[in-house]
Amino acid sequence: MKKISFVLFILFLFTSLTQAYEISRIQFVDDKLNPIPTAMFINQIDTKPGSQFSQKKLSDDIKRLYETKKIKDLKAKVVVVEGLYELVFTLTLNVIVAEIAFEGNNEVSEGKLEDQVEHQIGIPMDMEQLSKDKAKIFETYAENGNFNTQVNIVTEETDEAGEVKVIFKIKEEESYQVDSVTFVGVSVFDPDDLQDEMKTQPSFWRYFFDTGFLNEELFKYDIEQIQSKYEAKGYLDFAVLDIERVIEDEYINLVLYVKEGEPYTIKDVSLHWMKMPNKEDQEKVFEEEDLRPLLDAAPNLLYNRDTERADIDRLTEKYNNLGYLEFSCRTILKPNTEKLEVDVEYHVYEGTPSVIRDIKITGNSITKDHVIRRELAIQPTDLSNKLLIDKSKNRLMGLGYFKSAEIIPSDTGNEGEKDLTVKVEEQETGRLNFGAGVSSASSFVGTIGVQQSNFDIDEDWPYTGGGQKLRASIEAGTSRSRVEVSFTEPWLGDKPLSLSTSAYHATRFYDEMEEKHTGLSASLTSALKSFPGWRFTRGLKGEYVSVEVDDERDASEELLDSEVSGEWVTYLFLNFSKDTRNSFRRPTKGGKISLATEFQTIALGSANDSYKFRLSGSEYFGIFDESVIKVSGELGGTDAVDDVEYYDRFFVGGLGTIRGYEYRKVGPMDEDDEELGGNSLLIGSVELDVPLFKRVNGAIFFDAGNVWKGSYDWDPSDVNVTTGLGVRLDLPIGMLRLDYGIPIHNVNQDDSSGRLHFNFGYQF
C-alpha cells in the first residue's frame, strides 16, 4: 500500500510540474524592486497576460530584451500570488547618456569629432556603439597621419541619478613622415628586399604632400613580417636588437640593428597527443603513421616556419572534415644552439567529434531566416566543420545585407552535439542614386536609379527581407539614353538557381545614324557542380530593333545598306563564366574568364539565322609596391545565313578597347570614314597600375587589336598597336580616369597623333 501511495505521489508531482499554466500578470522591476513601466518592454516580448507559459518562449523573450541594449542584467521568475501565476522580470538598466564630450583634441575640431559619434544623447549607454565611435575617431586621426593617437572612453556620474557623461579622452602624439628605413647587420637578404616586405616605407610624395606617416602598430607588424622571412629560411635566432629613430623637423629616419644568427636544421619531427580532461583513456582517432604523410617538415631539412604552418593547416582540415571542431595543433620548438639543430614537436588536441544539432539566427529584424539559412554551407545533422562555418560566414557577408556576420559554436550539454548561433548586424540595402558622367566615348550622361538588393515581392511595404533584387534606372545623355527595370530571384524554388528578368528601351546616337533597342529578357543562372567556380547562364531575349541613317546626310551605299526599318529579333543565349578576382574594385590577383554566345533563328521569330560569340579573359598579378599588372584579351566572331546585321557586328576603338583611336573608329570603314563594323574581333591589353599616393594611381599600357569584315578572319599579324599613360583619381565626388594613347603601329588607320580618353562619374 505504501509503495502504491508513493508511486501516485510521484505521478502527481510530475504532472503538476509539467502542466502548462496561464500567466495572469507580467511585471518589470529594477534591481531594487522598484516598478518599471510595463509599456517600456511589453512589446518586446511574446509572453502576454493570459497566455500559456512556455520555457522556450521565455528564453526568446530574454534574448529580445537584451537586444534592446537598454538592459545590463536580467533575471526572470514565475511567482504564485493568491493562486495566480505572475511573471516577474528583474532588470538592471543601463545608465542614460546625458552628455558626450571630448578632451585633449587640438589637431581635430570638436565639430568633426561629433560627426563621427553615432551614439545618441538621452538613451541607455551602449558600449558596443561607443566602441565603434571610438574606432571612427581614431580613423579620423589616422587619415591625417596621426596613427599614434590614443582614444579612451571614461564616464562620469551627473547630478541626476542614473545618468552619466561620456568623455572621449584623446592623447595626441607627434606624427612624422618616414624619410628612410635602414638595416644594419644584414647579409642574408638584400636590404631592399626586406624593405619590400614592410608597409612602413618612405613615400615618393613625402616632400610635396602630407603622406607616408609613421604608424607604430604597422611598424611592429612589419618587424614581425621580417622575422617570419628569416624564420622561413631557418634563422631562429634572428632578432631586432635596437631601433634608432632620428628626427629631422617633420621627418623620421628609422635604423634597425639586427642579429641574423645562423640557419637551423631539423633534427627530429614528432607528434604528441594531448589528452582531454577526464578522458585519459580516450583512444586516438589517428595513429602517427596516419598523420605523418601530411607533414612536410622532416629531419635534415632547414627549418621553415611556412612549412610548419602548412602542416598544421593540413592536419586541421583532416580532423575538421570528420567533425572535430575542437581540434587544435601547436608546435613546440626545442633548439640546440650549439649544434644549430631543432626538434619540432606537433602537439595535437583532437577533441571529440560532433554534429550540428541546431542553428539559431539573431540580429535579423528585416532579413528572413530562410534567406540566411539557404546561404549556409553547413546545416543541422552535418558534421561540425570549421571550414564550412567559415565558408558560410563569407557567403553571408557577400550578400551585402550585413555590416557584420559571426557564426559561434556552443555546447549543448549533450556530448557529440553542437549548436551554431548566426549573429548578424543588418545594414541599409536600399539605394537611390543620382549620377552624372562625361567621357570621350559617350559625352555627357545623367543617371537616376533606385535599387533594393533585399527585396521581397511577397511582403507588404516596404517589401524587404526576401533576398530578391529590384532595380529601376533612367539614363539620358547627348549620345545615348536607356530606361530599364530588372528583377532577380537568386533562389528560384528554394534552389540555388537564379532567375533574372529585365525590360528596357535604349537609344544610341552616332554621327550618321540612330540605333534603338526595345526588349525583354529572362535568364537562369546556376553553378556547374562538375566544374567548381564556373557559372552557367541560359536565357532568351526578344528585341525590336531599328537602325536609321540620317536623311540629311549624304551617306554611302554601304551605310545605307545597314539600315533596319524595324524588325523583331529573338536571341537564345548561353554564357559560361568564372571569376577568381580577390576584389572587384582593384584586384591584385586572380582573374575572370567568360564565354558568351548568342543564337538567332527564324524558328523563334527572328529575321535571320545567325550566331555570335565573345571569349574574353583577364588576369591580375600583384607585384612590387602594391602595383598590379593586368593582362586581358578578347576574341569574337559572328556569322549568318544572310549578311550579319549592323547591330550584331563588332566595333572597337577608344576607352575599353584600343586607346589612342576615336570611339569605334578601328576596322572596316566606308568611303566617308564612317564605321561599318566587322564579323571578327581580336583585342588584347597589358596595363601596369602603380599607386602614386593616396587616391592617385598611374598607369602604363599597351593595347592591340582589330576588327575584320569577314567571319573567321582573325590575323594576329594584322593588328593596330598603341601605347600610353594614364591617371586614376579617386576623388570625393567620383572616379576620374584619364588615358592618353598613341598609335605605334597602324594597319588600317592613318591617325598616329594620339588621343586623350577620359571618364568621370559622380554618384550622390
Image (cartoon, grey):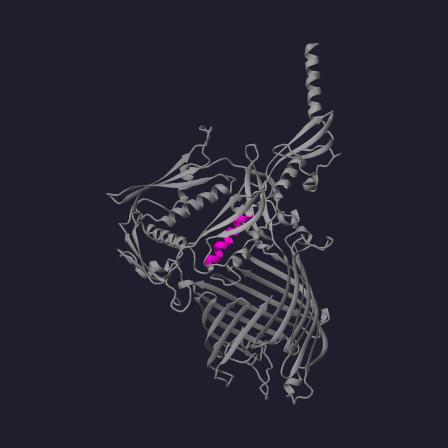
Rendering coords of residue 647 (x, y %): 64, 76
Q: Is residue 588 above or below residue 708?
A: above
* Residue at the farthest right position: 50
Q: Is residue 307 above or below residue 447?
A: above
- Image quadrant holding the C terminus, namely bottom right
**Predominant SS of the magenta segment:** helix
**762 displayed left or right of 25:** left
Q: Say whether residue 296 is visible.
A: yes
Numbered circles on residues, count: 0
- Image quadrant holding the N terminus, namely top right
Rendering coords of residue 751 (x, y %): 50, 85
Q: Is residue 684 above or below residue 16?
A: below
Within the magenta stretch, is there residue 135?
A: yes
Rendering coords of residue 316 (x, y %): 46, 43
* Residue at the farthest left position: 338
- Which residue: 57% across, 45% down? 125
The stretch in magenta equals: 129-142
* Residue at the farthest bottom position: 554
Q: Say whether residue 388 is visible.
A: no
Rendering coords of residue 375 (x, y %): 60, 50
Q: Is residue 92 above or below residue 493?
A: above
- Which residue: 59% across, 86% down? 670
Within the magenta stretch, is there residue 640?
A: no
What is the quadrant of residue 312 in the picture?
A: top left
What is the quadrant of residue 676 in the picture?
A: bottom right
